[in-house]
Amino acid sequence: SYVLTQPPSVSVAPGQTARITCGGNNIGSKSVHWYQQKPGQAPVLVVYDDSDRPSGIPERFSGSNSGNTATLTISRVEAGDEADYYCQVWDSSSDPWVFGGGTKLTVL
Amino acid sequence: EVQLVESGGGLVQPGGSLRLSCAASGFTFSSYEMNWVRQAPGKGLEWVSYISSSGSTIYYADSVKGRFTISRDNAKNSLYLQMNSLRAEDTAVYYCARDGEVGASAFDIWGQGTMVTVSS
């Protein structure tokens, strides 16, 4: 089945830019979605179809996808952005909905 | 308010069964595809099962195929997951998630989750 690879952790100072990557074979040909999950809470969709934002998600959250890497970018990081972030794609394989392993974003 | 509320979790012995429910409100449930996603303690998200809006198309993760059954009752705005032959590795928070209004198979609405613990 299709595999998505994320770094376990990313750290960034407040006000700086965080970039969280999601690697997969030719992931640029797929639609990538990103979820934010804070401790004890359900995931929240923050970016869909590579770079679109659902209603209510700040413009600070953006995404890109090309080649073998998709990236979630969080600009002007705030303490409240500290969370786990997961990428997701749909793939025509045995387990069609695939999540990455997750990245813990720490705001220093 | 658009909402999904799971119930039915609990403690069950290995080999036992449990039925999870997910009650939908605030949207036309019968128009949406739905999914179950689980998260083992301290671990990442794992997709479990999908059902189309009419219930005619169903998919399962290999890890649960043959043991879990997804279903829905559109008249009751409810989604279900029947879990049989439970194993310790099925211990997780189980979320129902709407296959959404935006994106290609993006899960735009999630419930708060229900905990399933498989232990003797």
Image (cartoon, rainbow, N blue to C red):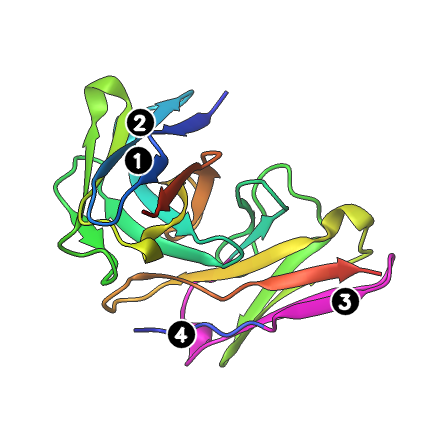
In the picture, the disc for residue A11 is 3
**Callout 4: residue from which chain?**
A
Q: Which quadrant is home to the N terminus of chain A? A: bottom left
Q: Position of residue A41 (x, y in %)?
A: 58, 40
**How many residues crowd around disc 3 within 10 Å: few (fewer than 14), some, or many (20 or more)?**
some
Identify the chain of the residue marked 2, using the numbered disc in the image.
B
Alpha carbon separation for disc pair 4 and 2: 31 Å
Residue A7 numbered tag: none
Residue at mark 3: chain: A
Labels 4 & 2 near each other (Cβ < 8 A): no
Image quadrant assignment for residue A97: bottom left
**Mark 1 or 3: the one toward you:** 3
Q: Quadrant of residue B79?
A: top left
Left or right? Give the position of A99 relative to A12: left
Q: Amino acid at mark 4?
A: Val
Q: Which residue is mark 4?
A: A3
Q: Which residue is mark 2?
A: B29
Mark 2, residues whose alpha carbon is within 10 Å: few (<14), some, or many (≥20)?
A: many
Element assignment for label 4: loop
Q: Residue at x 27, y 54 (%)?
A: B87
Along the horizontal axis of the image, is A78 left or right of B72?
Answer: right
Magenta-tinted stretch: A7-33
Amino acid at dot 3: Ser
* Amino acid at circle 1: Tyr
Q: Type of residue at label 2?
A: Phe
Is A8 inside the magenta-drawn segment?
A: yes
Residue that mark 1 sits on: B32
Is residue B1 shown to the viewer in this render? yes
Closer to the camera: disc 1 or disc 4?
A: 4
Q: Chain of mark 1?
A: B
